[in-house]
Amino acid sequence: MNIEERLLEKKKAVEQGLERVLSQGDSLLFRAMRYAVLSGGKRFRPLLTLSSGECFGVSRDVLLPFACALELIHNYSLVHDDLPSMDNDDFRRGKPSCHKEYGEGIALLTGDSLLTLAFEVLAQAPVDEKLKSKKEQIIKEISHLAGVNGMIGGQLMDVTLSPGELTDKIFNELIQKKTGALIIASVKTGSILGGATNSELGAMVEYGKNIGIAFQIRDDILDSASEAQEGQLARPNSVSLFGLEDSKCRVKNCVEAAKAALDEASLESEELNYLASKLLELGNRKGK
Amino acid sequence: MNIEERLLEKKKAVEQGLERVLSQGDSLLFRAMRYAVLSGGKRFRPLLTLSSGECFGVSRDVLLPFACALELIHNYSLVHDDLPSMDNDDFRRGKPSCHKEYGEGIALLTGDSLLTLAFEVLAQAPVDEKLKSKKEQIIKEISHLAGVNGMIGGQLMDVTLSPGELTDKIFNELIQKKTGALIIASVKTGSILGGATNSELGAMVEYGKNIGIAFQIRDDILDSASEAQEGQLARPNSVSLFGLEDSKCRVKNCVEAAKAALDEASLESEELNYLASKLLELGNRKGK
């Protein structure tokens, strides 16, 4: 298999894992959870967990529940972010967003359920006795990075800061929290399970931090292109702050810094390098 | 100290524990979290965790983080339940509800943050090596009972069932999930940490199940009294379904069944019996 095929095969394993954890019931809430999660998506975070874990020799079976939990957390955040009191987005991945399809109350509960289920999946992840303390460490890391000091903190900045307050430094903090924190959690999870040394973990965090920034700026570039077509006004993003050329340049620098971090720590992962390089491609907008 | 004083002292320890975990930052989100959590409340669930754990000889220091995590989960559910798309409650514990004070978007993120923080507190709870597997079991139990098959599932029933669908059986399922599940989680947590046998755990669950029902029906009785005063219309509750006298009778029966469950398993806990008996008192409405 070439690298594209290997990553596609990993993505399929993630889809199957997600389908499994979301097929425990058939209530309206389970249907809404499946609607929100099983409708496309790049599965970028779980791929990072699988690729980073395999870089240290961890088996797919061990990694998969953790990878799925991270994707559940990502999807809960999308469902809640789309709500009218937040970004008020009517569409997600080309379909009506969860609250447009199921109503606001159900969408709220769907997000809550996905977040809670993520921690149930983490707690139930089957690991050997010797990995139990690492699992505990991972639950700490994920809850911290997904919480008020990480992802939710970034979301707070996104909804409360006025355009005038968005300096370069503050905007960087915003995207590092909003997008970067869960991406860092994804590579940390695989690395911790694999028994990474402190310096290896540091390199993985540096990789995650840089691709997190690249991922968000690239997303803004793609958003700006489609918004220019649709004539919508959006809140400030990388493109409106830095301009298109500077934004592209930042993506390129971050991707290079991400690869360099792995290289310096002698972490060889064709997949992690490939996933970073893919962020340089600015093709058509697909599922967000 | 008499029993009232002992419980008051426990409640103070819970308040201090909550203040500690909520004092890590001073962002708008932390202020909103503190507003939502540190403004009264009976701390019924954490008291159950402390009392059930001490019944098996577990120390206060070990129990406290778990007790606080359960209260954080309870409070996240209140913040989200109060939102306009759910119960649309303007007041909570005699003060403007979180979204009335901070706006809907911040209230949404406040609930998300409290839920995420609860799992961080659980993962960080310091326990001896020999209690680590019990801690893992507790995270499984709590995430399960707080999730789509437990508390959130009950909330779904509450917002989706029409009055005509509320049979006695379905209403019982609703309150057992919506209110009972987290109360059961609270006594299970203390019992699991204390190394309860299966039959002792079964008795504790039976106790929790019964006081969960008693707690909710009592709440409905108190709600009905204040709503009658205020002339509000509410969705169906125990009183509108069963009538006032039958509701009181159900509370009494559940409290007796709860105590009998402990008695049959030879679990002696003056506090757990007292907390059950307190549900028979129908004094003035205080913090919900």
Image: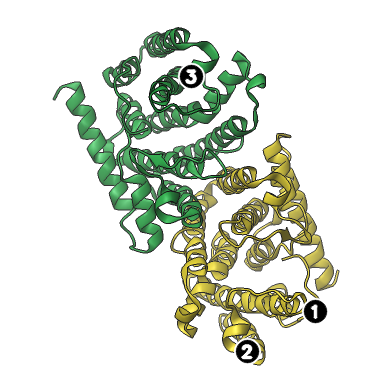
Chain colours: A yellow, B green
Asked which secondary structure carries label 3, the reply is helix
Q: Which residue is mark 3?
A: B202
Residue A239 vs B7, above or below: the answer is below
Q: Nearer the viewer, mark 1 or mark 2?
A: 2
Residue A281 vs A127, above or below: the answer is below
Chain under callout 2: A
Q: Amino acid at mark 2?
A: Gly
Around disc 1, counting alpha carbons within 10 Å, would you say few (fewer than 14), some (14 to 19), or many (20 or more)? Answer: few
- Residue A58 in view here: yes
Q: Nearer the viewer, mark 2 or mark 3?
A: 2
Asked which secondary structure carries label 1, the reply is loop
Q: Position of residue A197 (x, y in %)?
A: 50, 69
- Whole-number angstrom distance, CA of label 2 to CA of label 3: 63 Å
Same-chain check, marks 3 and 1: no
Q: Which residue is mark 2?
A: A243
Same-chain check, marks 1 and 2: yes
Chain under callout 3: B
Q: Are marks 1 and 2 in contact (CB under 8 Å)?
A: no
Q: Earlier in the sequence, mark 1 or mark 2?
A: 2
Q: Nearer the viewer, residue A239 or B220?
A: B220
Q: Quadrant of residue B266?
A: top left
- Whole-number angstrom distance, CA of label 3 to CA of label 1: 58 Å
Give the residue displayed 48% in from the left and 41% down from the top: B82
Q: Which residue is mark 1?
A: A283
Q: Residue furthest left?
A: B1
Around disc 2, counting alpha carbons within 10 Å, would you say few (fewer than 14), some (14 to 19), or many (20 or more)? Answer: few
Of the 4 image quadrants, the one containing the N terminus of chain B is top left
The numbered dot on residue B243 is none
